Image (cartoon, rainbow, N blue to C red):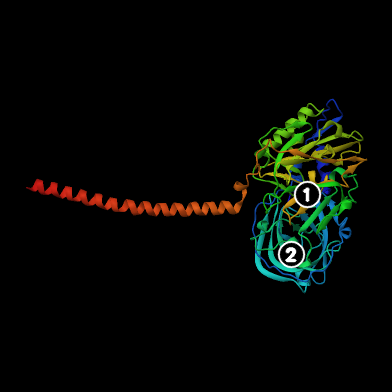
Amino acid sequence: MGNYAYSSFWVYICSVCLFGVTKSYLSIPLKIYPGKYNVSTAVSLPVTRLVDGKGLSLASDPSGQVNFLDMVGNLQGDSGRGYYLEMFIGTPGQQLNILVDTGSSNFAVAAASHPFITRYFNTALSSSYRSDGQAVAVRYTQGNWMGELGFDLISIPNGPNGTINVNIATILSSEGFFLPGINWQGILGLAYPMLARPDSSVEPFFDSVVKQLGIPDVFSLQMCGTGMLTNNIADPPGGSLIMGGAEPALYRGSIWYTPIVEQWYYQVEVLKLEVGDQNLDLDCREYNMDKAIVDSGTTLLRLPINVFNAVVDAITRSSLIQEFSSGFWEGTKLACWMKGDTPWRFFPKLSIYLRDTNTSESFRITILPQLYIQPIADVDGTMDCYRFGVSSSANGLVIGATVMEGFYVLFDRAQQRLGFALSSCAVNGGVALSEISGPFSASDVASDCSGRAQQDPLLWVISYSLMAVCAIILIILLLLLVLPCRRRGHSGEITDQSSLVRHRIK
């Protein structure tokens, strides 16, 4: 899950930014508002760390064919506040909005009141709810929650037909998880069991849906947000979560596929990045440092520190803005232009090269500046302010909403691959905000940029366990060899000393 933010805070952010401001004009009508509010903390959500879980795996009869058109438009929200899905939980069903997150694996819902949510799941009112009795907690880079495992029936009004019996974590307490202005009351983790908490025996939500409803092990996401935002906060663009396949009405052109490198997060292999026509020329392993994942719950495009610095340097070199505040790149300041003077022409495109399923080739996904220079709110009615939709990361590259909003993303778990196509909603004023091109030869990069052997937690555990066993055996062998030698040495020394004593007595 990423560092979600909420739209109601932006007015506050901009109002705070107005105090103590020195208006500095560059060669274009640009103003930087520093303020005391750390924008990056509010808008760049953490990526969920590796977690584990325990629970029940239940099944019921399949319910037949899936009509994908019934699911079109079933998401609400935007990248700043998160994309959420309406669900009915329990018997009788209690309606809740659930955040869609491909970067975690627990299905968790608020089960107690909280100042920042309007409703919660009351387990006492559901005749079908059963508690597992086991405590569970998930900590994110920002925020955490604690609760109890259980299971209950759920249905999705604009989803696959049928009722599913699923594992549910009931959130009883939290810190920094629910924030003002959000309109969701739980989180739907769509990643693999390895990330489930408290261990991987907790069957994730989508695994249960596939088993019980008999749908293909595929889902797809269209997220229509930041770049298409028209300042109408009351009517967010939303998007679609299609369970069981892909809906052609939601994308244009062909779907390009990249392998899923590891089945925990949706980990992919990034071969290179370009800023405009500038290749960053970094070792491809820099892009995959720790991991490179696709995560709908992360607001921004997050890059390893070296890669982030190289991107900022390249944008600065190619941008028409020669003296730009470092606070804008760091996420602590907003950039504001006079109304109607949009900044798109001042910034280059950003491109990410992904390894193709034909591993000797790659393809390129590109976003225009409309997606990564993101509108926030006007300050005083005369200016429009923007944030930088890219941030540095200490735990890997994350293709978050900043990039995903330009594409229709297909999570083809059955064939262990992710698909990217041009999203039908990634258009603003008749201008397409994203591009896909390829194939390109991947012969000039390493055969494996992901460092998979170093990233598989299970392999690390096995390796360290074997090393520990070998170390113990070696110590035992050394003790068996050393102790007899010491005994023999001591006996000889005593004999010699005794002879010397006897000699002296004589």
Residue at point 15% right, 50% down? 498
Residue at point 76% right, 29% down? 316
What number is the disc on residue 208?
2
Q: Residue furthest bottom?
A: 127
| Circle 1 or circle 2, nearest the eye | 1
Pointer 1 local density, CA inside 10 Å: few below 14, some 14–19, many at least 20 = many
Q: Position of residue 82 (x, y in %)?
A: 80, 51
Q: Is residue 342 above or below residue 131?
A: above
Q: Secondary structure at mark 2?
A: helix
What number is the disc on residue 419?
1
Q: Residue furthest top?
A: 27
Tell me the distance, in whole angstroms, between the alpha carbons under discs 1 and 2.
22 Å
Query: Residue 150 sits in which quadrant?
Result: bottom right
Residue at point 80% right, 29% down? 319
Could you tell me the amino acid type at mark 1? Gly
Query: Residue 263 sits in which quadrant?
Result: bottom right
Pointer 2 local density, CA inside 10 Å: few below 14, some 14–19, many at least 20 = some
Q: Position of residue 235 (x, y in %)?
A: 90, 51
Residue at point 28% right, 50% down? 486
